[in-house]
Image: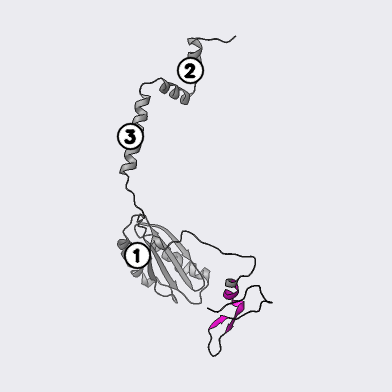
């Protein structure tokens, strides 16, 4: 037989866990409607007062530093150029990330500052740090060239076009279909017959 009445209700309430006890307390509380109304008013206020822009301008100073060292291998570039430059640039206030790319004969460092940093201060401090350490440039390396980059220069999407069969564009764009123009070294697409490919290069 099951027990009914107030005693069974209080007994089940005592078995509730913390979340259940909190919810049970709000079910019959007279403050619950007031809490709901207050939450709705705060949400409406935040939506109306939060500033909005169609194209918000996010200031993230970014700099590219290039150093050339002809004939050097990527390992030599990394050890003699990139790593010492990274150590110097990490001393600049506001630097968040430093990325290095070391192809043969060249070092490229991408310096990214904290969001909201002043671009003018970032440029000046980077120039001062590098130019005050020109005596540490290894033999055979050029002076660093610094170029300013903005957040708008960072790609947000990359597209790769692919086709299983050759089209008109791929026929004309493929270097295998090019031949040298007479009397100079300029290359231009050569016309192919329909037997060689389903696509024929057209002249525009």
**Residue occupying the point 36% across, 68% down:** 130
Image check: 146 left or right of 72? left
Residue projecting furthest to the right? 195
Q: Image quarter for residue 129?
A: bottom left
Residue 38, label in figure: none
Q: Are marks 3 and 2 in contact (CB under 8 Å)?
A: no
Work out how far the residue at label 1 is from the one at label 2, CA to CA, in angstroms.
66 Å
* Mark closer to the chain start, 3 or 2: 2
In the displayed structure, 181 sits above or below 100; it is: below
Residue 176 in the image: state x and y as whole percent: 62, 77
Q: Which residue is mark 3?
A: 41
Q: Disc 3 versus disc 2: distance between alpha carbons? A: 33 Å
Q: The N terminus is located in which quarter?
A: top right
User: Does 88 sit above or below residue 56?
Assistant: below
Please tell me which residue is depicted at 45% across the width and 66% down the height of the picture: 82
Q: Secondary structure at mark 1?
A: helix
Counting from the top left corner in percent of width and height, residue 101 is at: 48, 66
Instruction: Tell me how far mark 3 sits from mark 1, CA to CA.
Output: 48 Å
**Which residues are the magenta region?**
170-193
- 25 sits to left or right of 11: left
Indicate the position of residue 166 as horizontal and vertical percent values.
63, 70
Residue corresponding to mark 1 = 126
* Residue 77: in magenta span: no
Disc 2 target residue: 13
Mark nearest the camera among 3 and 2 is 3
């Amino acid at each position: 037989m099951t027990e009914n009445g107030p005693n069974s209700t209080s007994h089940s309430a005592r078995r509730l866990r913390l979340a259940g006890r909190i919810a049970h307390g709000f079910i019959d509380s007279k403050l619950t409607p007031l809490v709901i109304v207050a939450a709705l008013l705060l949400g409406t206020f935040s939506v109306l007062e939060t500033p909005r822009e169609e194209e918000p301008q996010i200031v993230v100073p970014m700099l590219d530093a290039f150093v050339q060292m002809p004939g050097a291998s990527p390992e030599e570039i990394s050890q003699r150029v990139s790593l010492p430059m990274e150590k110097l640039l990490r001393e600049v206030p506001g630097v968040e990330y430093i990325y290095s790319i070391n192809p043969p004969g060249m070092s490229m460092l991408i310096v990214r500052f904290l969001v909201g940093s002043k671009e003018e201060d970032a440029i000046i401090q980077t120039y001062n740090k590098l130019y005050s350490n020109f005596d540490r440039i290894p033999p055979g390396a050029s002076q660093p060239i610094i170029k300013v980059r903005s957040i708008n220069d960072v790609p947000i999407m990359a597209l790769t076009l692919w086709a299983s069969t050759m089209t008109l564009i791929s026929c004309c764009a493929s270097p295998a279909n090019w031949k040298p123009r007479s009397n100079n070294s300029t290359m231009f697409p050569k016309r192919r017959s329909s037997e060689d490919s389903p696509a024929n290069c057209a002249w525009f």
